[in-house]
Image: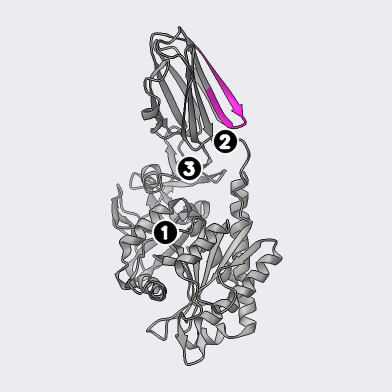
């Protein structure tokens, strides 16, 4: 952390403790731990260096905010309570500043992170390791085939699975799958199927166990790894089954895919905000947000095309495009990422800066105000709808519908902000979140960029300067490109 609160009394000296291993995105690093008042603690700044996110010290309130994967977690010096969104959690001892470090009880890693981010983390107590379960193999679908002399269960997984067998317990069969996650939904579907009476899913830190309970006609078994598609096949044999005259086939989940799907980002949809009868923010009599958005979007598209990406735009001239149509265009064009370009405005002429938003519940009144202003464009396509009636609850539903892309959208916003803040002399440059209608239903990583405040004289001067625009576009393009390269490397393995 860059800020040192020298006026705070420290928590007293912390002694070295047992280090923890943090495995994240395929890489493992040691996180030093210390002992303080009988509790293991760690430096939150060191965790941020491993996992990423943004760490902010608020001196006046003696608090530290850690933004990670779309969640803001707020700790207070000397208080065992911390806040994550609207929820409040209790730690066994109070975190706080110790010199230039902000120390947090290790329990936050060993229990709380798994609850806060169940789709990302699990803590392996035996190994003392925080693990990224996205590196695990996951069940995509499974197929069941029953004929009079065999019962076949095919498991289609996202990556190859290591396994071990245990049939020492009569009437059952245990399949141990390492570094794997399987939903318990399979329990409801594999019941009274051929030689299998039922199956239990037993998750643990290193993987998952499938415990098959067999009927008295079951005999031998065979387990084999499959490569096309990737997964496992489990086949049981035994005495002829009564009442089964012809094969019975059941597929649960997505149908097996035999060819490899390319998940990398190649195509970008750029959305110049507003247009036509919707001017957006207006400064004076001649400066319209819609014109600035279009000019910058064209410059950005040209630079991204030079980087080798296929770029399309929701509009290429001064025409009105409904917000819902912008979403549809992105999805129908099979775009891989959606970037909506805007300028901001505020009743306060002192407010300025560069901000990147992703779709989630607004945390502050300022974020709600910005979203409300952008959502007012709905009045041009839905005269029957008052945009002011759209509250946070609608955006919570949108967020859940697009939860698959929430982390990616947040990480895209963060990468852009980091690149722009390093390259431009901008006083305020932040990642923010709110309910923007234009991001509703975009099934891909998506962000909305507020490049400047037209209500601020300094921002106006910058955004209307060709020299500044070229510099800003260069760093904006670099931020988008950096995110895409990182994302593509992740999904390509």
* Distance (Cα) linking label 3 and label 2: 30 Å
Examine the rendered structure and indicate whether residue 415 appears above or below residue 203: below
Q: Which residue is mark 3?
A: 19
Answer whether labels 1 and 2 touch (C-beta < 8 Å): no
**Magenta stretch: residue 226 in it?**
yes
User: Measured from the top left, where is residue 114 in percent x and y?
Assistant: 39, 44
Q: Which residue is mark 2?
A: 159
Q: Is residue 249 left or right of residue 364?
A: right
Q: Nearer the viewer, residue 4 or 391?
A: 391
Q: Which residues are magenta?
A: 221-233
Determine whether the residue tagged by mark 3 lies in a helix, strand or loop: loop
**Magenta stretch: residue 246 in it?**
no
User: Measured from the top left, where is residue 167 in percent x and y?
Assistant: 45, 13
Q: Nearer the viewer, residue 382 or 103?
A: 382
Determine whether the residue tagged by mark 1 lies in a helix, strand or loop: strand
Mark found first going from the N terminus, 3 or 2 = 3
Examine the rendered structure and indicate whether residue 336 appears above or below residue 107: below
Mark found first going from the N terminus, 1 or 2 = 1
Q: Residue at x 53, y 41 (%)?
A: 135
Mark nearest the camera among 3 and 1 is 1
Q: Which residue is mark 1?
A: 66
Give residue 493's quadrant in the image. top right
């Amino acid at each position: 952390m860059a800020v040192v609160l020298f006026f705070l009394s420290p928590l007293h000296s912390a002694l070295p403790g047992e280090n923890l291993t943090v495995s994240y995105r395929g890489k493992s690093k040691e996180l030093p731990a210390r002992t303080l008042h009988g509790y293991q603690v760690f430096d939150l700044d060191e965790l941020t260096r491993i996992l990423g996110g943004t760490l902010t010290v608020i001196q006046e309130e003696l608090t530290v905010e850690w933004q990670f994967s779309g969640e803001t977690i707020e700790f207070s010096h000397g208080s065992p309570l911390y806040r994550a969104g609207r929820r409040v959690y209790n730690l066994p001892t109070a975190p706080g500043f110790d010199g230039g470090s902000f120390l947090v009880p290790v329990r936050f890693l060993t229990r709380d992170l798994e609850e806060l981010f169940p789709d990302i983390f699990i803590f392996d107590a035996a190994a003392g390791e925080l693990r990224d379960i996205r590196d695990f193999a996951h069940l995509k679908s499974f197929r069941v085939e029953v004929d009079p002399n065999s019962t076949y269960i095919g498991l289609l997984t996202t990556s190859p699975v290591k396994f071990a067998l245990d049939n020492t317990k009569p009437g059952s069969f245990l399949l141990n799958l390492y570094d794997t996650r399987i939903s318990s939904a399979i329990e409801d579907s594999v019941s009274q199927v051929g030689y299998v009476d039922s199956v239990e899913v037993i998750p643990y830190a290193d993987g998952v166990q499938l415990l098959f309970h067999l009927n008295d006609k079951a005999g031998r078994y065979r387990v084999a790894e499959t490569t096309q598609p990737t997964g496992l096949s489990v086949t049981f044999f035994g005495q002829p089954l009564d009442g089964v005259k012809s094969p019975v086939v059941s597929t649960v989940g997505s149908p097996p895919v035999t060819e490899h799907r390319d998940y990398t980002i190649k195509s970008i949809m750029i959305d110049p905000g507003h247009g036509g009868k919707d001017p957006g923010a207006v400064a004076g009599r001649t400066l319209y947000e819609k014109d600035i958005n279009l000019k910058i979007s064209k410059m950005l598209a040209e630079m991204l095309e030079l980087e080798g990406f296929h770029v399309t735009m929701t509009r290429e001239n001064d025409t009105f495009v409904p917000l819902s149509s912008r979403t549809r265009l992105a999805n129908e064009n099979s775009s891989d990422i959606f970037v909506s370009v805007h300028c901001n405005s505020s009743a306060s002429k002192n407010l300025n800066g560069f901000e990147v938003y992703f779709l989630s519940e607004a945390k502050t009144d300022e974020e709600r105000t910005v979203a409300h202003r952008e959502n007012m464009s709905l009045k041009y396509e839905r005269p029957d709808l008052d945009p002011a009636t759209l509250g946070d609850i609608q955006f919570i539903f949108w967020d859940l519908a697009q939860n698959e892309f929430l982390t990616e959208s947040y990480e895209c916003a963060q990468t852009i902000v980091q690149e722009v803040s390093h390259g431009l002399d901008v006083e305020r440059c932040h990642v923010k979140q709110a309910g923007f209608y234009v991001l509703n239903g975009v099934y891909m990583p998506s962000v909305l960029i507020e490049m400047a405040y037209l209500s601020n004289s300094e921002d106006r001067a910058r955004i209307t300067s060709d020299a500044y625009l070229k510099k800003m576009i260069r760093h904006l393009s670099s931020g988008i490109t950096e995110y895409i390269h990182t994302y593509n490397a992740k999904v390509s393995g």
